[in-house]
Amino acid sequence: MKKLWGGRFTKTAEEWVDEFGASIPFDQELVEEDIEGSLAHVTMLGECGILPAEDVEKIKDGLLRLLEKAKRGELEFSVAYEDIHLNIEKMLIDDIGSVGGKLHTGRSRNDQVATDMHLYLRKRVKEILSLIRGLQRALVSQAEKHVETIMPGYTHLQRAQPISFAHHLLAYVWMLERDYERFSESLKRINRSPLGAGALAGTTFPINRHRTAELLGFEGIYENSLDAVSDRDFIIEFLSNSSMLMMHLSRLAEELILWSSQEFQFVELDDAFATGSSIMPQKKNPDMAELIRGKTGRVYGHLMALLTVMKGLPLAYNKDMQEDKEGMFDTVKTVIGSLKIFTGMIETMNVRVDAMEKATKQDFSNATELADYLAAKGMPFREAHEVVGKLVLHCIEQGVFLADLPLEVYKEASPLFEKDIYDALNPRTAVNRRNSAGGTGFAEVRATLAKVKERLGTL
């Protein structure tokens, strides 16, 4: 087949070489964006008097027909035409004749592909923002039901202090809020038009780049043509933001995996998000949570891959940059799928309130309450810490917990102890008293819930 750029060449590559260099197997994902960009470009060419009105109308009609076919999945792409741009141009020429070849006036594939990816990411980031909000609302809904559900809080995966389960869930709401802010902020850089920058140096045609930016809904243009075609910061930023988001999802996935185990039994995931074993009939595996935890590494990989591709490239466009797309497409699919799965898991999760509260009474997570008790009565906290540490050691040696010790043992440790110590040791009391800003006290958690709901627009 004759190449659309082949005038200077006297020899054609072998088929397997074409296949290796072609991007159409994956960049056909950009088909709608490519046609949208072309519609704006040809509209501008007509307005600027670069193409006659009859040619513009012919080209636009042809592009609109292709767009409708693309939406119905009826377009057939060929490796012989390498990429989405040349495939669409060939289809257009086949449909309307040689006038279709005028579409490429005043632009290059270099600015065209960059424009396509800006349009693509703008759509997908807006979808991701909506899905983040959906997951936050699911977490808030569960939190509202469990303000006074208490559970062990952990550091080093060792029981530390009892906390409200709602407080734990809200920690992820705030993590996701930072993700939301990062993706929102990135739209300022995504929503910038490279169209009209040409291959690297602009064009001699009297085009209007601001007009194509306006037609495509961009907030402005790249001010430097070299930068416009060689910039992939906006994709790297997207991959970075996605990596951070997936890290947060992976941490929550890990907790759900632990909590749903026989050792914890804090939650049960809905059957729709679990699988069984081919050999062990009793098994219910948290596979969706495990998959999200695993897919996090693949998103990290796409970030590192593109950073590595870009680090040694001179300006402007280089064929290496074709490697920017597959990781971007895969990350979009992974992030969107993970957010949808997670929202469903949280919405349908069964919380075992009794198991959580029981766990808070079978450990030493109330030891800090004793130290605070003594400090409130005037003992330096460091001394109080030592006194309580010795009491914990005594309990371990006796095989009992702090609430089991008789008052006389406390009195021997310090005369400051009174019988109200048992109320202080109650995990529910311990949680409810922690009403410092951002704390786990029930009143503070309710106040935080109100703030979060207002921010999410769910009041």
Image: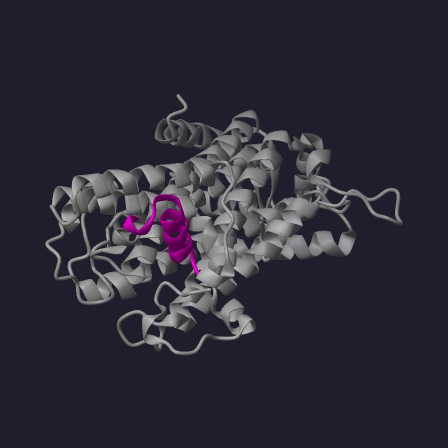
Instruction: Please determine whether, in this image, residue 88 is positioned above or below residue 5.
Output: above
Numbered marks: total? 0
Instruction: Please determine whether, in this image, residue 291 is positioned above or below residue 229.
Output: above
* Colour mapping: one colour
Asked whether residue 359 appears in the rendered view, the answer is: yes
Is 311 in front, or is 315?
A: 315
Residue 323: x %, y % from top left: 44, 66
Residue 259: quarter of image: top right
Asked whether residue 412 appears in the rendered view, the answer is: no
In this view, which residue lies farthest toward the top? 459
Give the residue at x 37% y 30%.
451
Give the residue at x 41% y 24%.
458
Is 54 in front, or is 277?
A: 54
Instruction: Please determine whether, in this image, residue 299 is positioned above or below residue 37.
Output: below
Residue 180: x %, y % from top left: 38, 43
Left-right relation of 48 to 182: left
Q: Which residues are magenta?
A: 82-99
Magenta-drawn stretch, dominant element (helix, strand or loop): helix
Residue 117: x %, y % from top left: 36, 53
Please say whether residue 289 is one of the residues in the magenta stretch.
Answer: no
Is 10 in front, or is 405?
A: 10
Look at the image and tell me in which quarter the C terminus lies.
top left
Residue 354: quarter of image: top right
Left-right relation of 220 to 309: left
Instruction: Please determine whether, in this image, residue 38 is positioned above or below residue 320.
Output: above
Residue 455: quarter of image: top left
Please say whether residue 94 is one of the residues in the magenta stretch.
Answer: yes
Give the residue at x 56% y 72%.
16
Residue 89: x %, y % from top left: 36, 52
